[in-house]
Image (cartoon, rainbow, N blue to C red):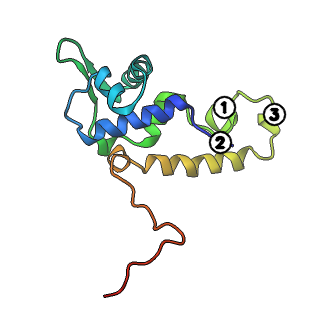
Amino acid sequence: MLRMSKLTDYGTVIMAYMARRPRDVHSVAELAAVLGMAAPTTSKILKRLARHELVQSSRGAKGGYRLARPPEAISLADVIDAMEGPFGLTECSAVAGLCLQEAGCPLRDNWQRVNQVIRRTLDGVTLAEMSRPALRPAAQGAVAAPQT
């Protein structure tokens, strides 16, 4: 099963929340409380996002973190890269030279194609989109509203 780490998931939640109010400065305490996360974890995630220039930090009594760019200019791929490192479903599709079988692997090109499709998809989803509520399809078996 392919899965992001919990920290990456939390990083996405933090960034989507911040995208709802992109000009505001958000404190670690505020984010942790509102999002139900531990403050040390929230701080760790924000520091990593700052190192990758997705958020900016400011010190002082009114300090905290804010998005470094508009939410429309930050993709889901940017957040995943900051949290996980180079994106890749397999070692050889992320960074060349990590796999001993890389040179003769009959699947390498196919994995790289799959990786590129997923990467393009993640690049095409912005924080602005992630911060909006998703439309949910009607539940199966739901009773239709009576006709009037």
Q: Is residue 128 left or right of residue 138?
A: left
Q: Which residue is mark 2?
A: 2
Marks 2, 1: nearer the viewer:
2
Marks 3, 2: nearer the viewer:
2
Give coordinates of residue 148: x percent, y percent: 30, 88
* Residue 141 found in image quarter: bottom right
Q: Closest to the observer: 134 or 77?
A: 134
**Element under disc 1:** loop
**For residue 40, above or below residue 99:** above
Q: Which residue is mark 3?
A: 101
Circle nearer the N terminus (2, 1): 2
**Dots 1, 3 in contact, CB < 8 A:** no
Disc 2 crowd, CA 10 A, few/some/many (<14, 14-19, 20+): few
Amino acid tagged 3: Gln
Q: Which residue is mark 1?
A: 96
Among all residues in the image, which is located at the extreme left?
62
Amino acid tagged 1: Ala
Instruction: Please report the residue visible at 25 percent of the width from the left and 26 percent of the height from the top.
Output: 26
Q: Is residue 22 left or right of residue 84?
A: left
Instruction: Please report the residue visible at 45 percent of the width from the left and 20 percent of the height from the top.
Output: 41
